[in-house]
Image (cartoon, coloured by chain):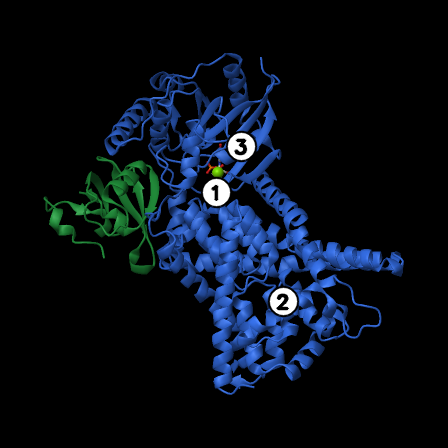
Chain colours: A green, B blue
């Protein structure tokens, strides 16, 4: 469903926010919307994520998870909380 | 000097307090409508400034950028850019920001500045910012942005005085709009603007050392994978109890009141005025009455919805329900409107206003009438008690209850199916809006804004009951009463009316689904409201005694209909668009007849096919 995340990973330290567990704390390195399970085009998805504050350098923390397949997730992005699905969070590369 | 009022527009990200500001500026002088042809709410209102300027305000749909990702955001963009037909460009834009959460709004402010129109930044919720120890260097910020800045507390008395004063000062001078430099921002533009916004915030805002943790603490329970769902279920249970039990006395009072009023008119008028008497009693009073009885339910549903929304819980309910609703192509926020539709589709459809995205809202409106509303209950109970034996199956389950449950389940299942189909066929060429939503901090709900919200909704409903719905009721009365029965005629008068003619004409069409002409005739007044069909069947089969005669009606029907016909009629009532008021509300809410016609036709088709299958299957099984 969510594409193969490993193909575009260039650093072993980097993970996709969509894979992270509750309690994860990290920093956004970049956005990569090319391989996600989202129904949006990569460009549109990246634009929306930027509009919700997902930009390089922002601190992220996964605060809550949904009941079914731990989806969606509630993410603290700097000082606001955004709810989104894991498939869209796949575009956010964090460390 | 013109005497026309000056136009203000409130622009800003969702949850920054635009509607609260709008409420405290205009009080109850508001008009809620739709933008022409679209399912987007238009809220406008008027007030007079301290210096006596008359001003109109527009509460624009919340947006994070002017990109126009959805029809509602396009409206904000087009009005701001002065491109919206029939909507003058605002003289002053009030850009509303949540002072505790400036990142996203400041980026929007930078984008709005490029439009070049006169604007002012309103730092709202300054009370919360102060309480948390956030300090903002207003002068420096105003310099950096090149904009006048004013702080406000939208929900406190006197909290907008400063805003009013500065608006007066601003409007006293004349302002030239610069040429717009706005172009649709690219990702690079957005990122650059965000960096600039973050730079300004770092320069002018000092955050407290201890962040607010209350919201987080509440969320760890409310969004808990298990407890979260339990809490949601409890809230819904209380809401349902309230809608059905608290509203009951008021509804009975209203319905008795209208009945008494009708009777009074009946008694006071001389019998020779038969027609006028019947029009007033059966057309006007019982027609309007049958809609107004829903007012208590509407008030209670909106009370709950607005409370939950103001508290910040709606976004959480959407979070909890997202995967469950999302499977059927529905937005998490569609949950509460659909649930309300179990009481009555009218408040349910009106409640879809909590869904921002137009397509999600339309899908929800389309399927809301499939939820088993309370007006179906009298029809269901009549037929079930007449045809289904009250035996126990599988040891514990009452068969009648089981059939009732099946009818509810069929409604829900078909609604979810229709939604999935609509998503596939209607919106295939549009990228669906992904679930991505800010979870605002919890706030104490404000009595005043809730009261204003409930009041505007009630007013809107009554206005509709008084116009569109009333005219439909009068039409239905007309069809059932004219032409009048000739002198000395046998049988009930309705048998000589247009309704009977239409019923007879429809009979060949309805025969394949097992309906006789009496049913066809009863379905016509049944358009006024579903439960009216029960009384209409009584009339057609010449049973005296109105509502109390339900048992008698059941006995007659049990003799006259086969079980196959009864089952077919039950199934018909799951799907058929048998409610003129719902159709009228859909027309109002979607801003045109198109979606009303779509709803009517698809429900009719569903009803016919389902009844056809039921009837033929039941006959094949030998259920007579
Ligand atoms: N304490 C406080 N709460 C506010 C203020 N303005 C708005 N609110 C609350 O913030 C929430 C969102 O406000 P609303 O007007 O619906 O935001 P909108 O989405 O921009 O229209 C509501 O619960 C309001 O009661 C304010 O100045 N102070
Ligand atoms: Mg609002």
- x then y, percent, for residue B283: 73, 57
Indicate which disc residue B523 carries: 2
Q: Secondary structure at mark 2?
A: helix
Tags 3 and 2 touching, CB below 8 Å? no
Compare residues B486 and B609 and report the one nearer the observer: B486
Q: Is residue B131 visible?
A: no
- Residue at 34% x, 27% y is B111
Q: State which quadrant residue B325 falls in.
A: bottom left
Give the letter of the chain under mark 3: B
- The numbered mark 1 sits on a residue in which chain? B
Name the quadrant of the N terminus of chain B: top right
Q: Classify residue B385 by image quadrant.
A: bottom right
Give how far apart the Cα atoms at labels 3 and 2 are: 45 Å
Which residue is tagged 3? Answer: B22
Residues tagged by mark 1 and mark 3 found on one chain of the structure: yes
**Chain hosting mark 2:** B
Q: Which residue is mark 1?
A: B38
Sequence-earlier tag: 1 or 2: 1
Q: Cβ–Cβ below 8 Å for labels 1 and 2?
A: no
Residue B375 visible: yes
Alpha-carbon span between mark 1 and mark 3? 22 Å
> Does mark 3's beta carbon lie closer than 8 Å to ligand 1?
yes
Q: Is residue B156 left or right of residue B555?
A: left
Mark 1: secondary structure: loop
CB-based contact (under 8 Å), mark 1 and mark 3: no
Depicted B452 relative to depicted B290: above or below: above
Numbered disc 3: secondary structure = helix
Depth order, front residue of B34/B238: B34
């Amino acid at each position: 469903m969510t594409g193969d995340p490993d193909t575009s990973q260039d650093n072993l330290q980097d993970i996709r926010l969509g894979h992270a567990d509750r309690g994860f704390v990290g920093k956004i390195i970049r956005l990569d919307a090319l391989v996600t399970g989202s129904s949006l085009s990569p460009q549109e998805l990246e634009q929306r994520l930027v509009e919700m504050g997902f930009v390089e350098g922002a601190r992220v923390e996964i605060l809550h998870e949904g009941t079914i397949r731990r989806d969606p997730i509630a993410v603290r992005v700097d000082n606001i909380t955004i709810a989104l699905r894991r498939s869209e969070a796949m575009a956010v590369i964090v460390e | 000097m013109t005497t026309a009022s000056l136009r203000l527009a409130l622009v800003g990200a969702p949850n920054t307090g635009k509607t609260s500001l709008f409420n405290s500026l205009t009080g109850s002088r508001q008009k809620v409508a739709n933008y022409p042809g679209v399912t987007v709410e238009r809220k406008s209102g008027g007030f007079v400034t301290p210096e006596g300027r008359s001003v109109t305000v527009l509460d624009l749909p919340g947006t994070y950028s002017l990109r126009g990702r959805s029809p509602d955001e396009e409206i904000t963009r087009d009005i701001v850019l002065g491109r919206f037909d029939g909507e003058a460009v605002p003289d002053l834009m009030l850009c509303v920001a949540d002072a505790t959460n400036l990142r996203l709004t400041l980026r929007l402010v930078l984008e709005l500045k490029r439009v070049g129109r006169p604007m002012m930044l309103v730092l709202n919720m300054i009370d919360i910012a102060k309480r948390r120890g956030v300090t903002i260097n207003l002068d420096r910020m105003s310099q950096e942005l090149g904009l006048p800045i004013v702080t406000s507390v939208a929900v406190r008395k006197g909290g907008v005085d400063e805003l009013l004063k500065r608006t007066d000062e601003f409007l006293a001078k004349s302002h030239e709009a610069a040429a717009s430099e706005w172009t649709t921002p690219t990702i690079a533009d957005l990122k650059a603007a965000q960096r600039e916004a973050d730079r300004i915030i770092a320069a002018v805002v000092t955050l407290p050392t201890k962040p607010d943790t209350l919201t987080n603490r509440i969320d760890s329970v409310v969004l808990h994978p298990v407890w979260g769902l339990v809490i949601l279920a409890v809230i819904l249970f209380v809401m349902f109890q309230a809608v059905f039990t608290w509203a009951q006395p008021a509804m009975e009072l209203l319905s008795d009141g209208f009945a008494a009023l009708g009777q009074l008119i009946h008694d006071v008028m001389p019998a020779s005025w038969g027609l006028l008497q019947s029009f007033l009693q059966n057309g006007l009073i019982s027609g309007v009455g049958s809609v107004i009885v829903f007012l208590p339910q509407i008030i209670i549903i909106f009370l709950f919805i607005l409370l939950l929304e103001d508290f910040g819980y709606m976004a959480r309910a959407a979070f909890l329900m997202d995967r469950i609703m999302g499977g059927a192509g529905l937005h998490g926020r569609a949950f509460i409107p659909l649930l309300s539709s179990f009481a009555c589709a009218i408040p349910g459809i009106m409640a879809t206003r909590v869904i921002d995205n137009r397509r999600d809202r339309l899908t929800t409106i389309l399927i809301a009438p499939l939820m088993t509303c309370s007006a179906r209950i009298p029809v269901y109970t009549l037929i079930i008690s007449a045809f289904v034996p009250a035996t126990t199956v599988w040891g514990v389950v009452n068969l009648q209850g089981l059939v009732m449950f099946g009818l509810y389940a069929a409604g829900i299942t078909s609604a979810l199916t229709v939604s999935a189909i609509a998503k596939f066929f209607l919106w295939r060429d549009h990228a669906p809006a992904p679930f991505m939503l800010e979870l605002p901090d919890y706030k104490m709900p404000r009595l005043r804004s809730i009261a204003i919200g409930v009041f505007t909704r009630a007013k809107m409903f009554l206005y509709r009951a008084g116009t569109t719905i009333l005219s439909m009721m009068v039409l239905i009365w007309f069809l059932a009463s004219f032409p009048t029965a000739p002198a000395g005629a046998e049988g009930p008068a309705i048998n000589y009316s247009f309704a009977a003619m239409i019923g007879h004409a429809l009979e060949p069409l309805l025969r394949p689904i097992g309906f006789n002409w009496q049913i066809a005739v009863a379905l016509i007044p049944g358009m006024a409201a579903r439960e009216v069909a029960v009384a209409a069947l009584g009339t057609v089969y010449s049973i005296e005694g109105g509502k109390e005669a339900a048992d008698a009606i059941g006995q007659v029907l049990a003799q006259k209909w086969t079980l196959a016909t009864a089952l077919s009629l039950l199934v018909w009532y799951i799907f058929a668009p048998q409610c003129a008021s719902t159709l009228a509300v859909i027309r109002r809410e979607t801003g045109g007849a198109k979606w009303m016609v779509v709803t009517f036709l698809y429900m009719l088709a569903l009803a016919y096919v389902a009844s056809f299958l039921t009837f033929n299957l039941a006959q094949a099984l030998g259920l007579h």
